[in-house]
Image: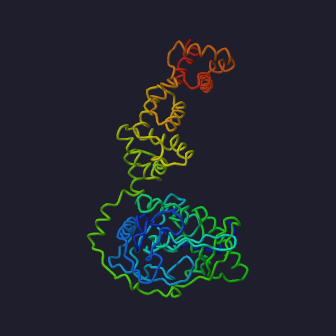
């Protein structure tokens, strides 16, 4: 461990902006669609034209409450919006409708894993609703503005400064994204800007109670980039302090190409935004029965599902963790078990061959030609020795390419496993003649040498020989005879 690491403690807090997947924008009826032609999804309300009046999106409010309940937050039944005033080219009104002193959600928490196998609780200060700004498109000699994103509903989730390392920040983001993906409130696609993260980071002498001067990091397009940017900025602050200078409170951009932070502007304080109540939106109250209804209809969240998979299906924590990383994959797993009770075998296939195919095709399990029924049928073909496990993996790829069942492909390609003693005896004759040295090793009691001959038999038969039967015949001929 370096001297700087022992002298200082890192303090990190994260602000995560979640773009909510509502059909329309936060305060108007414009379609909330990504990728349309520039400035085609706009109206007088989201452009802030004189005389236009905003109306709160009920579904966005419901999504915010859903997220708050999942994060263990308290829900503010009194809903008030405020104007956050600032000038920037992508903000057409020169203010943003947000929530200042009355966030919709507050005082929540997320548990993240630690290296010693326990958990650490990261507090959530607040989560407030607001509208998104537009998007600047930079050309060689000018910057253009696309206002399609303006007015898109956002929930900004602000953590407590409880993280002490870039890895903890990374783990927090992974856990938060997983929870959000289970709630059907956002596609969480960082490439589309649906999930964006700003990081506040400072250092202080080990044992100190007061926070150091923080900087805010922006422009990070992946969780790995967040971790890398934090590592760089922490090291930079160490150097600044150890040289006798002071860290300046400012906003920094992460330059992915240069792998360094670049100063953007001095950091604004809350009073610089001149918050005041939004005059065009009347405060209102959400009934407790509405909040209870949202909470009642929450889906099973990742952590309870993980524990249930371990207890109910006897999966290892490792296998269960991989399966629950996608809600659709977890559902697929349980649908398989309704017709085939061996959870371990199903998880081996899902976390092995199926996952490899998904990665190769860059698709989720819902987007490939596979149903629980067809995967189970394939597994049963291995169970009853119709095909070997090796051939089954090839069959899986053919199933996904063609949309055909395993039975159709095995029949068409003549892939059924050879278990006939006569055919296998002829194959073993060839192996014995070709590998006399291995034969002697088997006769001398070297069991691993049997495996070598079985492997050679599989190669010669192009995977069609029944490996279990081949092994039995080899032993019968060389050891028992």
Classify residue 75 by image quadrant.
bottom left
Residue in the picture at 39% in, 41% down: 336
**Between 361 and 100, the one nearer to me in the picture:** 361
In the displayed structure, would residue 212 be above or below residue 355?
A: below
Where is the N terminus found, in terms of image quarters?
bottom right
Q: Quadrant of the C terminus?
A: top right
How is the rendered protein coloured? rainbow
Count of numbered tags: 0
Judge whether 208 appears above or below 329 on screen.
below
* Residue 345 position within the rendered picture, expressed as x and y whole percent measured from the top left: 45, 38
Q: Position of residue 401 (x, y in %)?
A: 52, 38
Where is residue 107? Give x, y as percent.
41, 74
Q: Quadrant of residue 249?
A: bottom right
* Residue 2: % across, % down: 69, 68
The answer to whether residue 231 is above or below residue 372 is below
Which residue extends farthest right?
A: 243
Q: Is residue 436 left or right of residue 392?
A: right
């Amino acid at each position: 461990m370096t001297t700087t690491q022992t002298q200082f403690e890192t303090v990190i807090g994260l602000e995560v902006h979640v773009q909510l997947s509502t059909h329309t924008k936060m305060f108007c009826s414009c379609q909330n669609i990504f990728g349309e032609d520039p400035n085609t999804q706009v109206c007088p309300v989201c452009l802030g034209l004189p005389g236009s009046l905003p109306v709160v999106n009920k579904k966005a409010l419901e999504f915010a409450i859903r997220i708050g309940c999942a994060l263990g937050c308290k829900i503010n039944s009194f809903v008030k919006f405020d104007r956050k005033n600032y000038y920037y080219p992508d903000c057409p009104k020169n203010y943003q409708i947000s929530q200042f002193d009355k966030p919709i959600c507050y005082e929540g928490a997320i548990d993240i894993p630690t290296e010693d196998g326990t958990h650490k609780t990261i507090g959530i200060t607040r989560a407030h609703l607001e509208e998104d700004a537009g998007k600047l498109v930079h050309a060689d000699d000018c910057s253009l503005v696309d206002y399609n994103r303006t007015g898109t509903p956002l929930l900004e989730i602000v953590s407590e400064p409880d993280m002490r390392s870039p890895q903890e920040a990374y783990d927090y983001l992974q856990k938060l994204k997983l929870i959000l993906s289970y709630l059907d409130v956002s596609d969480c696609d960082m490439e589309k800007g649906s999930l964006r993260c700003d990081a506040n980071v400072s250092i202080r002498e080990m044992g100190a109670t007061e926070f150091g001067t923080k900087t805010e990091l922006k422009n990070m397009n992946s969780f790995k980039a967040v971790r890398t940017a934090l590592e760089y900025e922490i090291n930079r602050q160490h150097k600044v302090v150890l040289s006798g200078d002071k860290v300046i409170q400012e906003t920094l951009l992460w330059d992915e190409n240069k792998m360094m932070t670049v100063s953007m502007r001095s950091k604004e304080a809350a009073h610089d935004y001149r918050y005041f109540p939004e005059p065009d939106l009347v405060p209102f109250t959400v009934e407790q029965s509405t909040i209870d209804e949202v909470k009642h209809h929450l889906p099973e969240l990742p952590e309870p599902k993980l524990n249930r998979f371990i207890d109910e299906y006897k999966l290892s924590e490792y296998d269960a963790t991989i399966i629950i990383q996608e809600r659709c994959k977890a559902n697929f797993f349980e649908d398989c078990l309704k017709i085939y009770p061996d959870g371990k075998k199903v998880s081996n296939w899902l976390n092995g061959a199926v996952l490899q195919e998904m990665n190769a095709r860059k698709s989720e399990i819902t987007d490939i030609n596979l149903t629980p029924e067809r995967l189970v049928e394939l597994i049963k073909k291995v169970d009853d020795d119709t095909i070997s496990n090796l051939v089954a993996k090839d069959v899986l790829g053919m199933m996904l390419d063609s949309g055909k069942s395993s039975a159709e492909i095995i029949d068409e390609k003549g892939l059924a496993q050879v278990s006939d003693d006569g055919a296998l005896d002829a194959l073993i004759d060839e192996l014995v003649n070709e590998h006399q040295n291995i034969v002697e090793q088997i006769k001398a009691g070297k069991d691993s040498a049997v495996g070598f001959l079985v492997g050679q038999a599989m190669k010669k038969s192009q995977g069609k020989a029944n490996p279990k039967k081949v092994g039995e015949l080899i032993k019968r001929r060389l050891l028992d005879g």
